Amino acid sequence: MTDPSHDSRQDPRQGMTVVHRRYVPYSHAHYAGNLVDGAYGLGLFGDVATELCIRSDGDEGLFASYSDVQFLAPVRAGDCIEVSAELTKVGTRSRTMEFRLVVVARGRPDQGESAAEVLAEPVVATTATGVVVVPPRRVGA
């Protein structure tokens, strides 16, 4: 008899990725230097997790926990950012996801009020691991 918890076959949903891009408005600046608080990125992680759950399970899911949250670089008002979630582990009802927030363009107020540039090397600003739970699959779904 085979133990299903030791099944070497990977769930086909594993590796699914969702990416959102957005501009960080100045209304979200919270600190000197137009810095945005870390909670801003965590909220966006919730958004990509929701879409990933919809795509993988047909349900929005419910965030259960974050682990290993790393704030690696500042996020500022005027940044264009890319937020991604990758489904890395599929349990019976739990979904483990890896998150990244990357700054891809940044305002350059030193060069003019509305000056900005695409960064030659995107900056990884925040990473995290999170677990989302989804309801049990419905029969016939």
Image: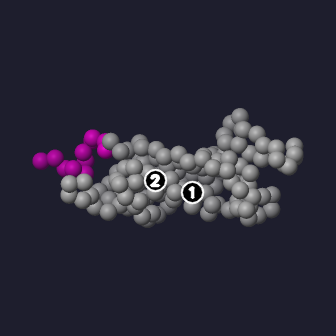
> Would residue 8 be counted in the magenta stretch?
yes
Q: Nearer the viewer, residue 86 or 115?
A: 115
Which residue shows up at 26% across the image and 58% down it?
137
Q: Position of residue 54 (x, y in %)?
A: 40, 54
Q: Please identify the quarter of the rendering in which residue 9 is found.
A: top left
Callout 2 crowding tier (Cα within 10 Å): few <14, some 14–19, many ≥20:
many
Question: Sequence-wise, which precedes: disc 1 or disc 2?
Answer: 1
Q: Position of residue 11 (x, y in %)?
A: 31, 44
Q: Which numbered disc covers residue 129?
A: none
Q: Residue furthest top?
A: 120
Q: Position of residue 109 (x, y in %)?
A: 84, 48
Which residue shows up at 63% across the image and 60% down it?
40
Image height check: is 13 above or below 31? above
Left or right: 21 in relation to 76: left
By secondary structure, the bulk of the magenta-drawn segment is best described as loop
Which residue shows up at 60% across the image and 47% down it?
21
Span colored in magenta: 1-11
Secondary structure of residue under mark 1:
helix
> Would residue 99 be counted in the magenta stretch?
no
Q: Does residue 22 show up?
A: yes
- Distance between mark 1 and mark 2 Cα atoms: 11 Å
Question: Quarter of the image containing the C terminus?
Answer: bottom left
Q: Nearer the viewer, residue 127 or 58?
A: 58
Q: Amino acid at mark 1?
A: Leu
Left or right: 39 in relation to 91: right
Q: Position of residue 94 (x, y in %)?
A: 36, 58
Residue designated by label 2: 51
Secondary structure of residue under mark 2:
helix
**In this rendering, the label closer to the viewer, 1 or 2:** 2
Residue designated by label 1: 44
Q: Nearer the viewer, residue 95 or 47?
A: 47
Q: Amino acid at mark 2?
A: Glu
